[in-house]
Every structure is written in C-alpha cells, then in structure tokens.
Amino acid sequence: MTTSAGQLTPSERILMGPGPSDVPARVLEAMSAPTVGHLDPEYLIIMNEVRDMLQQVLQTKNQMTMAMSGTGSAGMETCFVNLLEPGDEAIVCLNGVFGGRMKDVAERCGATVHTIETDWGNVIESQAVADAIKAHPNAKLLAIVHAETSTGAHQPLEEISKLVHDAGMLLLVDAVTSVGGLDVRVDDWQIDALYTGTQKCLSCPPGLAPVTFSDAAVQAMDKRKTKVQSWYLDLSMIRNYWGQERSYHHTAPINMTYGLREALRIVLDEGLENRIARHKRNHLALRAGLEAMGLNYIPEHSLTSLNAVHVPDGVDDANVRSRLLNEYGIEIGAGLGPFKGKAWRIGLMGSASSQRNVMLLLGALETILTDQGVSVDSGAALKAAGAVFAS
Ligand SMILES: *Cc1c(COP(=O)(O)O)cnc(C)c1O
C-alpha cells in the first residue's frame, strides 16, 4: 500500500487571530525532544518544573496547579465538573461566546444555572453581580470570563471577587486569553478555580490546559456527594499523578509538556511585568493605527491581547481576511455570534505581539481597504502607530 499524502508542508503564517498564536522555534524544538515514559523519573521532574513555573505565571501558591490534557475547553470542563454536581446552583456571567459555553458546561453537570447577562462587548458590572448574589444566595460558585475573546472585552475581577467571597461562594475564572499577556493574580484576586490554554498568550501549540484550584476549591471538591461526571477530568484521581503518589491515570501528553515547559521558560525569562508591558504597548500602537484608518473598537474596556473592531460599512469582510492570509500570510479572526460578518478580531498574543506584526498588519490592511474603495488617509495608520512606538 502507498499513500497519496505527500510531505507535510504547512505555510508559515503570522497568527494574529483569536488563537493559536505564533509559536517560537524554541518551543517547537523542545517538542521534538525524545519521548520518555509518563512515569520516567526524568519526566516527573519535568512535571514539577512545569508546576513551579505555572505557579509563577499564575501568581499563585496553589499546590493544585497542573496542566490538563486537552485544549482550553478541557480546562473549562475540569473546573466545572469537579466543582459542580447535580442539585448545585451556579451563577454564570454571559457577555460573549465563552460565557455561553460555561453555561452549557455547568448545565451538563446537572447544576441549576442563573445568568448575569449584558450586551456583547460590555463587561459585567459589580452591581449586577451583587444583585445576582442576593437573588441566588445558595449558588456554590460564580463563573466569569476575564478575557472574552469573542468581543475583546477585558473584565475587571477584584471587586467582583470580594462580593463573591463575602457571600461564601467560589470564584471560577476563564483566563484563556489573558494568562501570559495580561496581569492575572490568582492569589491576590482570590480566584478559586482558573483555567487557561497553551495556544493564546503562552504561544505554545494547542493541547494543554493549565488549571489551578485554591484550598477552598479543593475542599469543595472533597465534600462532593457524587463522583465527578467525567472520568478523564476527575481531579481526585489526576491529583495523585501530579502529587507524591505518581499513580497512573492516563498517559500524559509528554511532548506537549516539553513544549509548555519551554513556553513558560520564555515567559519567565522575559519577566511577567515586561511581557504585560509589551502587550500593552503593541495594543496601543495597533489601536492608534486602526483608529487613524477610521476603524472603531467594539469594547470600551479592550483587552491588550485581542482587538475587536467593527468591519467598516460596505467592506467585504471575507475578502479582506482571505487577502490578508493569501497575500501576506496574516491570519486574523472573524466575528462570532451577533458579530458574524461585522467584526474583526485581531490577536496580539504572546510572541505574535510585536512591533513588526503591528506595522505589517496596518500596512496590509491599508492597501486592502483602499482597494475596496474605503477612503483611507494614506500613511496615517503607520504614522500613528509609529508615534506610539517612538513615545
Ligand atoms: C480559546 C478560548 C477558549 C477555548 O479554548 P480551546 O483551546 O479552543 O478549547 C475558552 N475561553 C476563551 C476565553 C478562549 O479564548
């Protein structure tokens, strides 16, 4: 037998969409190191190193900090299935795709879900949280998205965390598009359960979902009356693999772990503060450039890792995106849900958050929009972005 599949030749892209982001060669090289067994003493050391570095990046001392097998959504399911059981109540904040996904997952756990809703692009106000807590005092947890990748909104968490804890509830946070790019302080902000993914601001390929649980979350898990619905994501077993016992649960994705280890080394080599500042600077420059071209941001509180802008009237959304990809190798994201065909989502995540990428995209976009008949002040975008870089 032969195969018609030829040699694998994916193009080199510039990944400026909602994820995955550009992966540094160092990470890809680390992933090609020899595969060892998941109980090899050398691998166990690597797991400890990954946990230590995750604790630093997540700014937490939580012992229950680990990388789950699977993408960010597996991290989401891990948090919900371990904390919720049938009969529980939960409050889920809904202002985009990922809040909606959390609601779906929480309901599949058999929980009664109450939502706090606001328009896409807005953040959840503390007052709405206070009202919901008052209306549903028996809720076990409140779940909220820190970086809503579908709208670009950057959710403040500190005040909400206080309200949630004063009511004796747990705070569950989706930080998939913030960890590694924005400030995420698990301990200072008293986050009880948090998940992220490798392929956004950590700039590692998709495949692992770092998760951390506070002592309070671990206690809530230990008090469950029923078994965790998911065998695969059951932390009561997986903790024994990441912990002292090292008992086999499922085969860890060894080479993905090598990749994450290298990606975390890169984050810590740069330094969290420097990395957060870099994401901010590149966002401000891109923003100045896009606005100089007449493009408007959707959220009032924008993430620095994701820029969601309205597609200008009369512009062919799909044509712009396919020209960016085919002529410049640049991937940006389309709008989802109510923003389908109406928004572009431009990621500046991890390694992809660079002055080079900002200037390249602005130049390419100016050319394409001009071709589509949009009246763009020639050179204004690059000048505005350049001024931010020069300041
Ligand atoms: C990407 C993303 C997810 C889902 O992650 P996958 O890796 O696609 O499973 C969840 N939440 C947010 C906010 C995301 O941006």
Image (cartoon, rainbow, N blue to C red):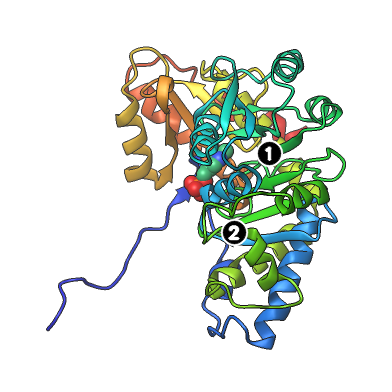
24 or 190: nearer the eye?
A: 190
- Please name the amino acid that badge 2 sits on: Asp
Q: x and y percent of residue 270 in the render? A: 77, 57
- Please name the amino acid that badge 1 sits on: Val
Q: Which mark is residue 234?
A: 2
Compute the Cα span from label 1 to label 2. 19 Å
261 relative to 76, above or below: below
| In this rendering, position of residue 354 left or right of residue 190 | left
157 relative to 117, above or below: below
Q: x and y percent of residue 160 in the render? A: 78, 26
Say which residue appears at 79% left-offset and 49% top-offset. 214
- Based on the displayed image, in which of its 4 quarters is residue 236 positioned? bottom right
Q: Earlier in the sequence, mark 1 or mark 2?
A: 1
Secondary structure under the numbered disc 1 in the rendered image:
strand
Badge 2: residue crowd in 10 Å (few <14, some 14–19, many ≥20): some
Badge 1: residue crowd in 10 Å (few <14, some 14–19, many ≥20): many
Q: Which residue is mark 1?
A: 173
Q: x and y percent of residue 87 in the render? A: 59, 35
Which residue, as the protein is rendered here, is positioned at the far front? 225
